[in-house]
Amino acid sequence: MTISPRILDKLIHSVNETIEQASDEVAELDRAIGDGDHVINLQRGLAILVEQSDDISQLEWVAAWQKIGMICMSKIGGASGSLFGTLFVSMAKSAKDKPFDSSVFAAAFLAGVESMKARGKTEAGEKTMLDVLIPVAEYLQNNAQSDLATVLAEVQLIATQSMESTRDMLATKGRASFLEERSIGHIDAGAKSCQLMICAIATTLQSLDEA
């Protein structure tokens, strides 16, 4: 199935609604070991994306990712804004002048995640959002030609398991790192929000595939 960028309007609204519904949960996670403003910053950026979702969905994939990236950088703020912005801008650069298909998307998403790692000087296992994004990106890269229904189901499972795995990790980045051993036992808020957004996107795409 070829997925048109026109689906971005639905995807943006789905992500926004999911984060709105889980905002108290994410905020509580962030207050436990972080600054407590992660979900507020995220909601600010998503509100702008919702406002512009119709225009964004009229663009081709590369231009849409570039626009989303610039909105994330300018409107979300903080480390999250820079990281999400880097993800989408790098995806746009990776996919430029290439015919869009599942392999191009997988390669672009992996390139975006690698750029996030470089910008944040972060690797897997440091109790950040990348503990969700890295395994999802690696799975997509290795399974780009697999059946869409299988990929969407597996991506949700990987994202959820990876988010849960941050509970037992020692934080080595950001404010949570100041807590040292006390950071263990808490799920990372960034990992949780990424899991929620990935699952929201996958669920929306599943409904499209089943229609």
Image (cartoon, rainbow, N blue to C red):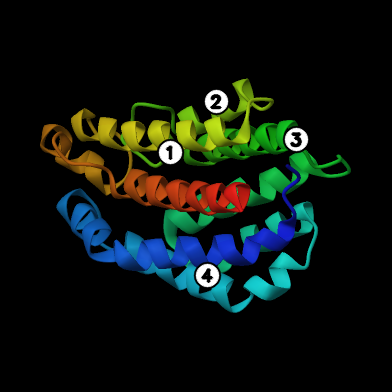
Can residue 73 be seen here? The reply is no
Residue at 37 percent across and 52 percent down: it is: 193
Quarter of the figure with residue 187: top left
| Mark in front: 2 vs 1 | 1
Pointer 3 with pointer 4, Cβ within 8 A: no
Please state which amino acid type lies under the numbered disc 2. Glu
- The residue at which mark 2 appears reads as 138
Q: Nearer the viewer, mark 1 or mark 3?
A: 1
Q: Residue at x 63, y 71 (%)?
A: 53
Q: Nearer the viewer, mark 1 or mark 4?
A: 1
Q: Nearer the viewer, residue 91 or 99?
A: 99
Residue sticking out furthest to the top:
142
Sequence-earlier tag: 2 or 4? 4
User: What is the x, y in percent for residue 171?
Assistant: 25, 35
Residue on which the image places disc 3: 104
The reply, left or right, for residue 84 in relation to residue 31 is right
Q: Total number of numbered labels?
A: 4
Dot 1 surroundings within 10 Å: few (below 14), some, or many (20 or more)?
many
| Distance in Å between CA atoms under marks 2 and 3 | 14 Å
Q: Secondary structure at mark 3?
A: helix
Query: In this orientation, which residue lies closer to the viewer: 113 or 198?
Result: 198
Residue beneath label 1, please? 156
Q: Amino acid at mark 1?
A: Gln
Cβ atoms under marks 1 and 3 closer than 8 Å: no
Element assignment for label 2: helix
Choose the circle earlier in sequence order: 2 or 3.
3
- Quadrant of the image containing the N terminus: top right
Between the C-alphas of marks 2 and 1, the distance is: 14 Å
